[in-house]
Amino acid sequence: MNGRLENMEARLARVEALAARVAEASADLLGNHAWQIKVCHWTEDMDGIWTRSCSETPWEFNSPGTTPSENGMRFCLECGGELIEHEYDCEKED
Ligand SMILES: [Zn+2]
């Protein structure tokens, strides 16, 4: 009887140790995956060309004057970051 109880306690200790390792591993995963909250800034110039914060290559839409969201884009195609739009403000330049 006593032996069985000890066995149970040993098992319980192993389960607790495992649970602690799982919690540690989850914290590591969450910490290392900063891409989950990554954003990408798209800035429109006066010609309707968009510059991206992740890339040197400018982006131009087939329908001029439209925004990424108007084209159904919520995430950057290149870096996968959440797309933040900065539309060109023509009144600002005057
Ligand atoms: Zn991007």
Image (tube, helix red, strand yellow):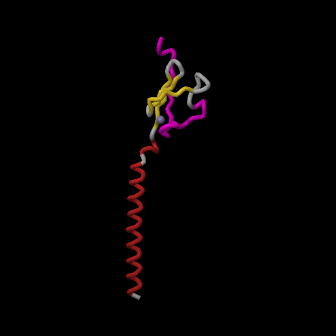
Residue 92 % position (x, y): 47, 16
Q: Nearer the viewer, residue 42 or 14?
A: 42
Where residue 63 appears, as percent x and y from the top left, is 62, 25
Q: Is residue 6 magenta?
A: no
Q: Which quadrant holds residue 67?
A: top right
- Residue drawn at 48 percent across, 11 percent down: 94
Where in the figure is residue 3, as x and y percent of width and height? 38, 86
Q: Where is residue 66, by image quadrant?
A: top right
- Does 65 sit above or below residue 53? above
Residue closest to the far front: 57
- The mark total stands at 0
Is residue 76 located in the magenta-colored stretch of the structure?
yes
**Depth order, front residue of 78/81:** 78
**Residue 28: x percent and y percent?**
39, 54
- Give the position of the N terminus as an image quadrant: bottom left
Q: Residue at x 55, y 36 (%)?
A: 74
> In this view, which residue lies farthest toward the bottom?
1
Above or below, comparing residue 88 to residue 74 in the picture: above
Residue furthest top in the image:
94
Whether residue 39 is situated above or below residue 13 in the rendered picture: above
Residue at the image point whose x is 41% and y is 79% from the top: 8
Q: Is residue 8 above or below residue 57?
A: below
The answer to whether 9 appears left or right of 64 in the picture is left
Q: Which residues are magenta?
A: 69-94
Which residue lies at the image location 44% right of the left edge and 34% below the top edge?
54
